[in-house]
Amino acid sequence: MNKKPIHIAFSPCPNDTFIFHGLIHGCVKTENLFFEPHLHDVEALNRFAMERRFDVTKLSFAALPHFTDRYALLRSGAALGRGCGPLIVARPGFNPEKLAQIPIAIPGLMTTAHLLLGLYLGKKPQSVPMVFNEIMPKVASGEFEAGLIIHESRFTYQQHGLTCVADLGAFWENETGLPIPLGGIAAARDLPVHEIQTIQEMISQSVRHAFAHPEASKAYIQKHASELSQEVTENHISLYVNDFSIELGDEGEKAVSTLMERAAKDGLVPHLQHTLFI
C-alpha cells in the first residue's frame, strides 16, 4: 500500500527534535501515512502558515489566531510549562520603567514572547524583530537597551554580561495561575479529520517514545543544536517537554484559551473566528 506523505514542519530547537525524532525515524508507525520533515525557525514557520505551506506545523500560540481558517490546533506536541517563559534582559543598571518607551529587540512579531510582552506592558511594544540568537549580542553591545529572549538564551544570557529585568512567564503565572503556553502543533483544516486524529495520536506516541528512549534521539538533537553544550540541550528539553506535550488536558487547553482571550481583549491578536480544535 502506498503511504500518503505528510509534510511536517518544526524547529531545530532541542525540544522539537526530541519530540519528533521517533515520528520521522519510523519509531512510531502507521499503515497509511509517512512524514517528510522540514526544519525552520519558529518565526519562519509562523510566516509560512500564512500560505498553508505545510500539512502539519509548529506555531507560536500568538500566531494561531491569524490562521484558524487554515489550521486547527492539535492536543499533542505543545510547549507549555511553568518557569519557562521568555525573559527581558538588559545591561546592569537598566531601569525597567523605561521598557514602555524604548525599542526592544524581539525574536519575531508573531511569537508568543512578543504577545506576552504586550500583555506585560499593557500596550503594543516598540518592537524590532530579528533572529533570536542576535538579540543578546546587540543588547550587550548597547545597540538596544533591552531585548526579549527565548529558547536556550534563558541559560546563557549571563555569559553576555546581561541581567534579567522581567520574567514574562512568572508574570503570566502570577496573573492567571496557569502554565505559560508558548508553542503548539497545528494541522491544516483541509486534511481529512480522521488523518488529523491519527497524526495527533502519533505525535503523542512520539513524545512517549522520546521519554522512554532518551538516548535514541541524542545524535539527531545534537546535529541540529551543534552550538549548544549537552548540558544546555538537556536543560532546554526538560524545561519545554513535559506531560502537556503528550496531551494538553483541561489545564493546558484553559491556558491556551485564556491567552487567546486576554490578547484579543487587549487588541494584540484577532478574535478567534473558528474553533481552536477540530
Image (spheres, rainbow, N blue to C red):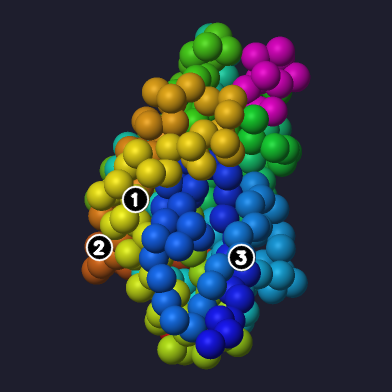
Q: CA distance from mark 3 to mark 2?
A: 31 Å
Q: Position of residue 229 (x, y in %)?
A: 48, 22
Residue depicted at x 42% and y 77%: 30
Above or below — where is 137 with respect to 118?
Answer: above
Question: Which residue carries the number 1 mark?
Answer: 210
Q: Position of residue 249 (x, y in %)?
A: 26, 67
Q: CA distance from mark 1 to mark 3?
A: 19 Å
Quadrant placement of the C terminus: bottom left
Determine contact: label 1, label 3, CB under 8 Å: no
Question: Which residue carries the number 3 mark?
Answer: 36
Residue 221 inside the magenta-drawn segment: no
Q: Quadrant of residue 127?
A: top right
Marking on residue 251: 2
Above or below — where is 82 with respect to 225?
Answer: below
Classify 10 Å Cα crowding around label 1: few (below 14), some (14-19), many (20 and above).
many
Residue in front for this viewpoint, 112 or 7: 7
Q: Nearer the viewer, mark 1 or mark 2?
A: 1
Segment colored magenta: 134-143
Q: Nearer the viewer, mark 3 or mark 2?
A: 3
Q: Amino acid at mark 2?
A: Glu
Residue in front for this viewpoint, 25 or 196: 25
Q: Is residue 82 left or right of residue 88?
A: left
Work out whether mark 1 precedes mark 2 in sequence or the reverse, and give the earlier one.
1
Work out whether mark 1 precedes mark 3 in sequence or the reverse, and give the earlier one.
3
Q: Amino acid at mark 3?
A: Glu
Q: Is residue 61 left or right of residue 209?
A: right
